[in-house]
């Protein structure tokens, strides 16, 4: 299969394909654009055997993983999902074009070249690469029936997995971009007369596809390998599809099966391998179930009964894996003079292990926490207030525990500069003697970190004692398996479905409390639960696993469709919840309300002392509920007309769209 993958990649060089009105240039030199598009020179030859289908499926699986693991050098794709939520903002303050003033910076022309990957967003990548993923899935769907050696059940299993890959990507596209081109076939010549297909029509199509996938794809227990789409994963995605189209009882039924009848269980105790971290003398870990649950070496082992589906990204075949730069991208930028001691010295130094005169393993924060540059930072709400339940900050929650080592607060760092009289003492933000601020850029250099999620081993670089800054331990992050779905999310999805059915259902709190009890929380939900409680628990449990922006917008749709209130008592209209503009606090969608309540957006400029963006003004507009359709996609579709989203240049409500997915599919045959 590896031979086939290499053959496909060689054949695909230089192929230009028009998908959804967008030109895909596979010959682009950007490393992060791999995997390359499949070959369409001789598809009937390439895909007439099971080996060909297996190669196509392997590329689908690898492409899925790349959303989490793609190496952009100074960013990670998933960060874009988080800065369009209440949980994170862009933090690369040395860049004047940092995407903070979203209301004014985000336009149809701002996100159509790779050069605009400015450390702070991947919108163009998420458009283009997602259509590539759809193309890979369509390849399998189109050619599988022609492989004569396969049984009908095997063909259906291939189709079901391909349906999952396509549905996963379309779910994300319609929540990010709204009405988009629907592509279900492999075109033989570039098609330039697409219309946009309405969001709900696409949702109806993928819901039907996922019903077939649940029927056809086997359980993980019947599969010889991990990392391929399994029945449990299909049920998870089908439940989200059901909720998006308003079939809440059906969504709940799927989660009942996953929770009660599929052999999964929340992990309650320590298990697997205990990895104590990079430099245990600097930051000791008290072994606990949350730490073990998120160690890469434990995520896909048989003892882990919680994993529904994971994405393999570690092992001996290093060329097949992608380094995840969590320790570089998501930790604070602490190793320079912008964090000082009370006596005016640089507080944290980057000291090599072979520097006998200065090295002390009690203060090796580079190896313990990584070499952060904080491309993104969490909001204060997501690191502090979000963790209050019943109005009480839960000191026992293992997911927020500094005492066990799972969570890092800036005060946990100790000054490691021997030239300072503060050596060995905790960092302080203000000088207690005169009130002076000791950190000149608190956006990029002063915030908490969920260490249990982001610390990733890098044994190769850990062994390099004398190398450069980035090669002195797991300073950037390593290759690591990651979760796609685990059972904790099934409880959260079931709680959400119950809320839309009957907000007064007393069992909603039980689903949330099952997760909280596993995390050893002292505070459990009592009485009625709001949709905000559910979304807060998602934020605590699924940070950097879920697509936060997509999930907020899916919930926004569900609230508008169901008529149920949010935590502030607001209700939303399906007619206009996603078609409003302005940066005031009222109106907009539930997504917008979460952002203005909890994030840095629309609070006014922030003064920091740094070169680059020294006065960042974080803004978000109600119209940013959907991202603009890229202008390059619209102009490339020069024989038709794609619809631009509300509030952006080029919006025209009269542009025709397909309101039935069957009509869009039939039109794909026209040129």
Image (cartoon, rainbow, N blue to C red):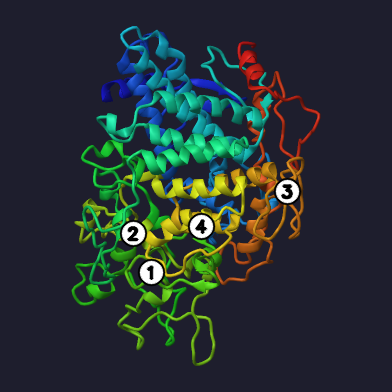
| Extreme-right residue of the structure | 654
The alpha-carbon separation of the residues under discs 1 and 4 comes to 23 Å
- Considering only order in the chain, which callout, 1 or 2, is on the residue closer to the N terminus? 2
Along the polypeptide, which appears first: circle 3 or circle 4? 4
- Residue depicted at 39% across the width and 71% down the height: 396
Give the quarter of the figure containing the N terminus.
Answer: top left
Distance of label 2 from label 3 (alpha carbons) = 37 Å
- What SS does tag 1 mark? loop
Q: Can you give x and y, in whole percent of width and height, for residue 551 in the image?
A: 55, 46
Disc number lying in front (3 or 4): 4
Residue occupied by mark 4? 509
Query: In this rendering, which labeled residue sits more in front, label 1 or label 4?
Result: 4
Q: CA distance from mark 4 to mark 2?
A: 21 Å
Identify the mark at residue 401; answer none if there is no mark: 1
Q: Is residue 116 above or below residue 214?
A: below
Q: Which residue is mark 2?
A: 290
Check disc 4: other Cα within 10 Å, few if <14, some if 14-19, many if 20+: many
Q: Say which element carries label 3.
A: loop
Regarding residue 147, the answer to whether it shows in the image is yes
In the depicted structure, whether residue 349 falls above or below residue 182: below
The number of discs equals 4
Q: Few, some or many C-alpha atoms within 10 Å of disc 1 (few <14, some 14-19, many ≥20)?
A: some
Q: Distance of mark 2 from mark 1, alpha carbons?
A: 10 Å
Q: Position of residue 634 (x, y in %)?
A: 67, 29
Q: Earlier in the sequence, mark 1 or mark 4?
A: 1
Residue 395 occupies which quadrant of the picture? bottom left
**Quadrant (top left/top right/bottom left/bottom right) for the C terminus:** top right
- Of marks 3 and 1, which one's residue comes earlier in the chain? 1
Tell whether 332 sits left or right of 124: left
Give residue 572's mark.
3
Regarding residue 129, the answer to whether it shows in the image is: no
- Name the residue at 25% across, 49% down: 297
């Amino acid at each position: 299969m590896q031979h086939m993958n290499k053959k496909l990649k060689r054949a695909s060089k230089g192929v230009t394909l028009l998908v959804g009105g967008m030109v895909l240039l596979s010959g682009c030199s950007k490393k992060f654009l791999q995997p390359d598009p499949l070959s369409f020179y001789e598809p009937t030859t390439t895909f007439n055997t099971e080996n060909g289908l297996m190669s196509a499926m392997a590329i689908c699986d690898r492409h899925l993983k790349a959303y989490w693991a793609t190496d952009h050098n100074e960013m990670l794709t998933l960060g874009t999902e988080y800065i369009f939520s209440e949980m994170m903002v862009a933090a690369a303050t040395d860049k004047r074009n940092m995407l903070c003033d979203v209301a004014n910076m985000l336009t149809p022309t701002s996100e159509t070249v790779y050069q605009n990957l400015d450390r702070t967003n991947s919108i163009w990548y998420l458009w283009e690469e997602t259509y590539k993923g759809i193309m890979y899935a369509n390849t399998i769907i189109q050619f599988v029936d022609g492989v004569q050696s396969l049984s009908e059940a095997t063909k259906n299993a291939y189709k079901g997995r391909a349906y999952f890959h396509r549905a996963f990507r379309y779910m994300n596209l319609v929540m990010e971009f709204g009405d988009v081109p629907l592509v279900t076939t492999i075109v033989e010549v570039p098609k330039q007369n697409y219309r946009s297909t309405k969001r709900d029509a696409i949702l109806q199509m993928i819901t039907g596809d996922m019903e077939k996938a649940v029927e056809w794809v086997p359980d993980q227990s019947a599969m010889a390998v991990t990392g391929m789409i399994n029945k449990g994963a299909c049920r998870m995605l089908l439940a989200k599809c059901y909720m998006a189209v308003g079939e809440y009882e059906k969504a709940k039924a799927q989660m009942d099966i996953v929770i009660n009848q599929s052999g999964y269980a929340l992990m309650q105790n320590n298990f697997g391998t205990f990895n104590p971290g990079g430099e245990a003398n600097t930051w000791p870990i008290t072994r606990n179930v949350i730490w073990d649950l998120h160690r890469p070496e434990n995520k896909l082992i048989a003892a882990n009964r919680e994993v529904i589906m994971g994405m393999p990204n570690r092992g001996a075949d290093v060329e097949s894996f992608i380094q995840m730069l969590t320790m570089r991208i998501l930790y604070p930028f602490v190793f320079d003079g912008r964090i000082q001691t009370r006596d005016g010295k640089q507080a944290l130094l980057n000291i090599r292990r072979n520097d006998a005169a200065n090295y002390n393993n009690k203060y090796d924060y580079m190896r313990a926490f990584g070499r952060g540059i904080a491309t993104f930072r969490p909001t204060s709400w997501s690191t502090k207030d979000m963790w209050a339940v019943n109005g009480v900050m839960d000191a026992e929650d293992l997911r927020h525990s500094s005492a066990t080592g799972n969570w890092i607060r800036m005060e946990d760092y100790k000054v490691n500069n021997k030239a300072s009289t503060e050596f060995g003492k905790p960092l302080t933000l203000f000088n207690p003697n005169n009130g002076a601020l000791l950190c000149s850029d608190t956006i990029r250099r002063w915030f908490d970190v969920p260490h249990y999620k982001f610390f990733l081993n890098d044994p190769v670089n850990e062994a390099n004692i004398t190398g450069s800054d980035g090669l002195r331990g797991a300073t950037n992050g390593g290759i690591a398996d990651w979760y796609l779905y685990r059972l904790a999310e099934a409880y959260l999805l079931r709680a959400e479905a119950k809320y839309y059915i009957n907000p007064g259902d007393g069992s909603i709190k039980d689903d949330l409390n099952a997760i909280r009890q596993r995390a050893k929380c002292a505070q459990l939900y009592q009485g009625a639960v709001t949709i905000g409680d559910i979304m807060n628990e998602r934020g605590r449990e699924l940070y950097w696993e879920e697509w936060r922006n997509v999930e907020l917008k899916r919930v926004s749709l569900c609230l508008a469709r169901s008529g149920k209130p949010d935590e502030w008592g607001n209700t939303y209209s399906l007619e206009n919840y996603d078609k409003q503009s302005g940066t005031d606090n009222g109106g907009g969608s539930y997504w917008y309300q979460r952002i203005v309540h909890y994030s840095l957006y629309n609070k006014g400029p922030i003064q920091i002392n740094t070169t680059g963006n020294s006065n960042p003004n974080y803004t978000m507009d109600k119209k940013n509920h959907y991202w603009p359709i890229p202008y390059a996609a619209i102009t490339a579709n020069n024989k038709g007309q794609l619809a631009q989203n509300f509030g952006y240049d080029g919006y025209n409500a009269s542009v025709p769209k397909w309101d039935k997915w069957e009509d869009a599919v039939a039109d794909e045959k026209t040129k």
